[in-house]
Image (cartoon, grey):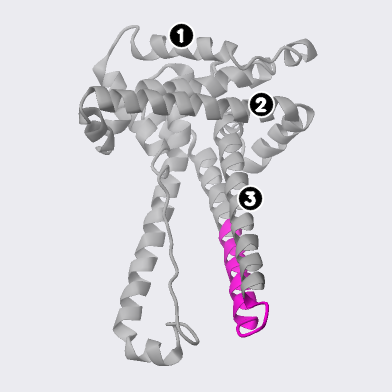
Amino acid sequence: MSDRIDNISLTRPVNEAIERTKIILFKPFKLDKWFVIGFSAWLATLLKGGFNFRWAGGGDGGVLSGEWLREHTWLVMGISIVSLMVVALWLLLLWLSSRGSFMFLHCVAQNKAEVKTPWRRWKACGNSLMWFRLLVAVVILAIGILTMAAVFGVVTAVRGCNNTTAITTGAVLFGVTVFIVIAAAVGVISKLTGDFVVPIMYMRSCNWRAGWREFFTLLKDNAGKFALYILFQIIINMCVGMIILAAICFTCCCAGCVIMIPYIGAVALLPITVFLRLYSLCYLCQYGPSFDAFAPV
């Protein structure tokens, strides 16, 4: 096993993933198979866009004063109800995408077009993944709120002082730096979870704790290789983006319109999503037979 780990390649899995993509989608080509696998891919990528939250305030004490709240009770109630609905919708999408991640992985790894079987079989793993993603979201939200509160507190406290501009600039830069670091950390955690922890959970039928525990052992001994993997993934995604952009331009934006249609867009992009899923699996296989997600389950 050590010999194989010493010969980890970033480019060899590209050819393997391409060949497996051809076998799954084109040898032979079956439209019904595309739609079934595309459905699982669509579920797995439901939360790729994310949500943007903005806060606005101004004046002495901000707009959310007690008097303002009393004068706009119905507006506050309406905003609260809408916010709860948005959170509920986000939780639903989080659950569906977590379950869909294992459905899509099952279809790709086993070259099968199935919905009911992986939905039932990987129920516990999908639910566990949802709780992990929810935990990460709560931690990030808490850090973000604390950072914003700290920056706002500093800006408010130094209002009217001699060095107000310098202190305010420093506080804002601190907040921006924290958010950049958080965004980078979230991106890496999300990437490692989707590419490696989910396959380990799939192969072991375990929860996210056991999956991360096993992967962390592998990561600790091969940190440099996985760092190069992340950098190579940036290159791959840039190439994929250029391919999609070229297709949109070549078809006079018709391809872009198709891609924007829910589910249909996932089916149209299936060769790309299948390749990306296969690349991480092929890369993970290099660390030994125990990490072969293509073995019969």
Residue at the spot 35% in from the left edge and 14% down from the top edge: 25
Image position of 170 (left or right of 47):
right
Give the residue type at disc 3.
Val
Precedes in sequence: disc 1 or disc 2? 1
Q: In the rendered image, which residue does mark 2 sit on?
A: 228
Magenta-highlighted residues: 139-164
Image position of 112 (left or right of 218):
left
Q: CA distance from mark 3 to mark 1?
A: 37 Å
Q: In the rendered image, which residue does mark 3 sit on?
A: 181
Point out which mark residue 19 bears.
Answer: 1
Q: Position of residue 50 (x, y in %)?
A: 42, 49
Dot 2: element: helix
**Callout 2 crowding tier (Cα within 10 Å): few <14, some 14–19, many ≥20:** few
Precedes in sequence: disc 3 or disc 1? 1
Point out which mark residue 123 bears.
Answer: none
Query: Residue 81 lies in what quarter of the image?
Result: bottom left
